[in-house]
Amino acid sequence: AVVDNGVDFANYFCTYAFLYHQKEMLSDRVRMDCYYNAIFKNKHHFLGKTVLDVGTGSGILAIWSAQAGARKVYAVEATKMYEHARELVKANNLEHVVDVIGGSMEDVTLPEKVDVIISEWMGYFLLRESMFDSVIYARDRWLKPTGVMYPSHARMWVAPVRSRLVDQKMNDYEGAMDDWFSFVNETKTYYGVDMSVLTKPFTEEQRKYYLQTSQWNNLHPEQVIGTAAIVKEIDCLTATVSDVLDVRANVSSSIVEENTRLCGFGGWFDVHFRGRDEDQTKHEIELSTAPSADYGTHWGQQVFLFYPPVRASKGDKLNVSFAMDRSKENHRLLEVEFGCEITQSSGGLPPPMKKKFYIE
Amino acid sequence: AVVDNGVDFANYFCTYAFLYHQKEMLSDRVRMDCYYNAIFKNKHHFLGKTVLDVGTGSGILAIWSAQAGARKVYAVEATKMYEHARELVKANNLEHVVDVIGGSMEDVTLPEKVDVIISEWMGYFLLRESMFDSVIYARDRWLKPTGVMYPSHARMWVAPVRSRLVDQKMNDYEGAMDDWFSFVNETKTYYGVDMSVLTKPFTEEQRKYYLQTSQWNNLHPEQVIGTAAIVKEIDCLTATVSDVLDVRANVSSSIVEENTRLCGFGGWFDVHFRGRDEDQTKHEIELSTAPSADYGTHWGQQVFLFYPPVRASKGDKLNVSFAMDRSKENHRLLEVEFGCEITQSSGGLPPPMKKKFYIE
Ligand SMILES: Nc1ncnc2c1ncn2[C@@H]1O[C@H](CSCC[C@H](N)C(=O)O)[C@@H](O)[C@H]1O
Ligand SMILES: Nc1ncnc2c1ncn2[C@@H]1O[C@H](CSCC[C@H](N)C(=O)O)[C@@H](O)[C@H]1O
């Protein structure tokens, strides 16, 4: 698929050009601690080595890599943020180590291949933004055959959840539709035009917006009512773009709560820093965005809600089919289809559910 | 300036493709009543005539034109909304009169010239969105020499205002900066990186966002503390694109309230439906977006705030310089510079103010 660069900048890169947005990521302590520890507890991977930071943003990972002893760090950033990264590198006296390069990863040329590629490329539910494509591109072109990836592995998880969002969104949707019907009446009465033919497309538009768009949420672990399952595992050293173009999985889950409401599914990811088989990290670090009582991340979880929610209870088995594809209109957005069959511990078999969602 | 169509769609047209957004405009009773009356109180301009609706959206103005007796109406719409417009036309049994044409005004070909061009092209503070360019284009190419424009005239107004928004935005800004300084401290303490070099660009970014971006507001007439002045008059029949590329004016205003706060300026517009000199409307209609106690419009007013506000009182004279240009980054957005000299009725001469604003 050919991507228009101007459109990609208008739709995607624009937010990253704001320090405000970079600061949000830099204020995510879970994220920061993991990358910090991944680097400083594994200095042997950086000492005297060459490093490429794909999408350096403010320059933070490049600076840490240099502080951990890298000989040379190439820090590539597509937006104007690279100017700030360059300032930051200088203010921290690392301009002799870190080369900040303004441009798309796909367009820049480095003077040498590198020992380490570090990048914080993860979007909502891991793959939103499709930035991993650029990391794969960088790896295939610039990583030495012996090089390591930071992070080295990634996983996507789903689990059944309960959430009052299901009621709230349904209320919002019903409110919008009530509004619509008054509007149709008034337009007919006052302005002599019958808009009722638009009720169907308006309903579809509003259903998509309120009921079929996944919701950002920081779930509490207690809202996870069944066992979580992995729907995708990625080895960052070997994965290809076609491996991440779509995701298909059939998984099962058991409800672990008595008498509860199955409102839908939560989706999240984790990544690991393990180095490569022949050259492992000394301390394996995990960055998890799973529901947590104490430590939320800016990624939160994506919540996919079913209407209406169904009763579920301990021991019920879920057979879940999961399919994720890129949106045809915007390759950085995602579409997900969840199917779910329930086998109740009581022996009951409610009708199977199937639903399409948009990750916007 | 060459405009990339894909980028323009990503930045501008996208919202108009939603029925939700069309409905917002269709629910603006002030707007609707004015266009409705302009058409139905001036049926002589439509009866048996050919009409072009530039940017028909849902199709409402085209349908009214047909209901008022037009022989043929060409309804041009750039977004996918044209499909809904076509359905609506059909459902109202006007498909023999209204031809809905999907495409940009600049790209479509009509089978004939028209007697009337109708369009609702006005953005915030009249010229935001720069859609009037497309109306000019349509007029020069498709309006008969004897044709009329609906609306026929437009004016931009400014007036001194008081508003608590000035305190709120200053608070927001100060909160954001407090946050920044804690962030800089924490990043130094926990992560060994000194971010203080970014304080200056971050401050600029936040000042622009909180203090230099004009605010949408529905002002109460009592918040207007001085006489309003016209900064631009447009004759839709003769105006050229270069006439609206920038706006320059020096105007004066008198404060009419005792002991008040001058917090900045409000900006709004009105348009009139007068036909043309040789072929006038029978009932002149005015659509005003001025501050009103009873009837707000979805345009509201744009508020341009000065920090800090200054004391002002009855009889103080303001000498106001106004300059508006299109944003270099996005030709549909605007940049405004306000200058203000105050001559107090007490004889005092506070220091003159000058400030740059962005209409986003
Ligand atoms: N193909 C590409 N080439 C260069 N930069 C890219 C890119 N795709 C995304 N980016 C940049 O990658 C960054 C991802 S956000 C992470 C920023 C920084 N590494 C940190 O950890 O804080 C954004 O600034 C984005 O503009
Ligand atoms: N150059 C152009 N060609 C075609 N349509 C355009 C255009 N510029 C803007 N538009 C469309 O013009 C509409 C303006 S909003 C007004 C919609 C409708 N006439 C009404 O009064 O309710 C939008 O739907 C927008 O997509």
Image: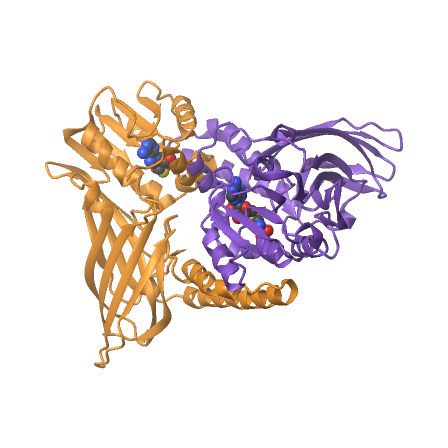
Chain colours: A purple, B orange
Residue A190, can we see it?
A: no
Relative to A343, residue A301 above or below? below
Q: B102 or A26: which is nearer to us?
A: A26
Q: A259 or A160: which is nearer to us?
A: A160
Instruction: Give the position of the C terminus of chain A as an image quadrant.
Output: top right
Residue B90, can we see it?
A: yes
Q: Total label count?
A: 0
State the image coordinates of residue A44 (x, y, percent, origin top left).
71, 52
Relative to A54, residue A293 above or below? below
x 48%, y 51%: residue: A82
Give left or right: position of A264 versus A103.
right
x 43%, y 42%: residue: B24
Relative to B269, residue B183 above or below? below
State the image coordinates of residue A239 (x, y, percent, origin top left).
66, 33
State the image coordinates of residue B325 (x, y, percent, origin top left).
27, 51
Q: Residue furthest right?
A: A346
Q: B36 or A52: which is nearer to us?
A: A52
Residue B17 picture quarter: top left
Q: B195 or B12: which is nearer to us?
A: B195
State the image coordinates of residue B337 (x, y, percent, origin top left).
28, 59
Residue A208 picture quarter: top right
Q: Residue furthest left?
A: B278
x 47%, y 32%: residue: A3
Give left or right: position of B81 versus B131.
right
